[in-house]
Image (cartoon, rainbow, N blue to C red):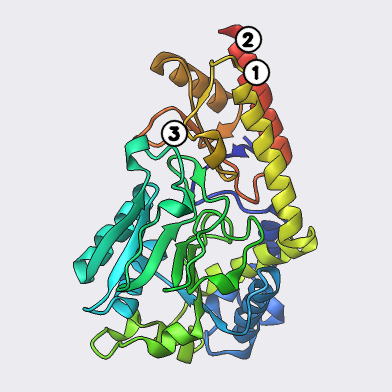
């Protein structure tokens, strides 16, 4: 099969122009006679790649000078403990808003390091909704407030972020960064594994308030778990994931070429509407997991009337060239991950398949 409709949850679809550009340069980058994977990370040729990716991120996300851009390895999962090592002193509390499995994991890791608290939770609703910001409980001892902006497994997403003034707001944005306009200045730290909207797996982008770095007491924190290590060395203390950063730059070039984040956001809304309208107009044949007010524009989760029909639908989808539509094992059913690089025509094709399947069953 020459091409498929890629709805994988991550690693996810990459823009075709970015892949084609990388293919063209794969064996001879910038007339060096080497692949970018072979370049020294201390070379001027690689430095151009590194700085280009940072500058594009800064421009596209409108990142203020108050914040630093770091390239870290270990995925978002390493950030769960890294942020606590840096920002959770013994006399403070890390506040966590639970909206799904990844926020639970972030809480679990931080609890190993310091004192934590559940500021709000949607667990009783089986994570079908996002808590109202007014429900979040704070204390005078808060070190930070942590949220997960989008929940890939359950298909929910924050529509408006809580306004936090007494402590830094920290967000895991792995699955919806660069998908819509955000006010970066309102966050102390944003971190995101690249493999959904930014590029391939291997690099995690951290956008962090420089004041947080300077104020962190990291005397007893291992060198590679300090944000200051990455900040002071321009993410080059050790060998960075050079090829992942290179492809990150290619993806950002593509976003810039099609009109930036505002353009991406408009297309994302259109893609999601195609699928949610199909669910809502199916007379209950398809049922969305997320409550309407909390629906994700990145991950559309739904079930069919029974498991037999779900499996039949997934088999037909596979035969027709649709990849990655299986729902997560924790909730079953189906999931269409429609990140930035998933084209509108793929969502239109899925809509037609869903309509066809309902009519024949």
Tell me: 41 left or right of 113. right
Residue at image coords 69%, 43%: 269
User: SS of the residue at dot 2?
Assistant: helix
Q: Label 3 belongs to which residue?
A: 327
What's the distance in space between the residues labelled 3 and 1, CA to CA?
A: 19 Å
13 lies above or below 223: above
What's the distance in space between the residues labelled 2 and 1, CA to CA?
A: 6 Å
87 lies above or below 271: below
User: SS of the residue at dot 1?
Assistant: helix
Quarter where residue 300 is shown: top right
Residue 190 location, x and y as percent?
49, 68
Residue at image coords 44%, 47%: 131
67 lies above or below 294: below
Residue 105 location, x and y as percent?
30, 55
Residue 355 circle label: 1
What's the distance in space between the residues labelled 3 and 2, CA to CA?
A: 22 Å
Query: Mark 3 touching mark 1, by CB under 8 A?
Result: no
Q: Earlier in the sequence, mark 3 or mark 1?
A: 3
**Considering depth in this image, is 131 or 60 the residue closer to the camera?**
131
Q: Earlier in the sequence, mark 3 or mark 2?
A: 3
Residue at image coords 62%, 37%: 4
């Amino acid at each position: 099969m020459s091409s498929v409709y890629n709805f994988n949850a991550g690693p996810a679809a990459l823009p075709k122009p970015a892949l084609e550009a990388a293919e063209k340069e794969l064996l001879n980058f910038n007339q060096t006679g080497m692949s970018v994977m072979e370049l020294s990370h201390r070379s001027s040729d690689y430095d151009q790649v590194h700085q280009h990716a940072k500058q594009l991120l800064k421009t596209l996300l409108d990142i203020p000078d108050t914040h630093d851009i770091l390239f870290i390895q270990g995925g978002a999962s390493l950030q769960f403990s890294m942020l606590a090592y840096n920002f959770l002193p013994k006399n403070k509390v890390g506040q966590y808003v639970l909206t799904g499995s990844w926020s639970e994991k972030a809480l679990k890791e931080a609890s190993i390091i310091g004192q934590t608290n559940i500021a709000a939770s949607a667990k009783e609703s089986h994570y079908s909704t996002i808590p109202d910001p007014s429900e979040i409980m704070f204390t005078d001892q808060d070190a930070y407030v942590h949220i997960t902006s989008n929940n890939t497994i359950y298909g929910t997403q924050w529509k408006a972020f809580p306004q936090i003034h007494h402590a830094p707001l920290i967000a895991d944005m792995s699955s919806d960064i660069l998908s819509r306009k955000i006010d970066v200045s309102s966050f102390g730290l944003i971190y995101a594994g690249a493999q959904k909207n930014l590029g391939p797996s291997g690099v995690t982008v951290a956008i962090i308030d420089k004041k947080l770095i300077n104020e962190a007491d990291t005397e007893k924190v291992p060198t590679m778990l300090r944000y200051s290590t990455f900040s002071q060395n321009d993410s080059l203390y050790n060998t960075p994931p050079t090829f992942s950063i290179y492809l990150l730059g290619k993806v950002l070039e593509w976003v810039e070429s099609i009109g930036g984040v505002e353009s991406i956001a408009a297309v994302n809304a259109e893609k999601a509407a195609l699928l949610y309208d199909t669910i809502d107009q199916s007379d209950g044949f398809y049922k969305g997991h997320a409550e309407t007010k909390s629906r994700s524009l990145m991950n559309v989760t739904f079930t069919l009337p029974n498991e037999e029909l779900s499996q039949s639908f997934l088999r037909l989808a596979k035969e027709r060239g649709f990849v990655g539509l299986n729902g997560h094992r924790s909730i079953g059913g189906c999931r269409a991950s429609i990140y930035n690089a998933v084209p509108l025509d793929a969502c239109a094709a899925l809509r037609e398949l869903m309509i066809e399947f309902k009519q024949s069953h």
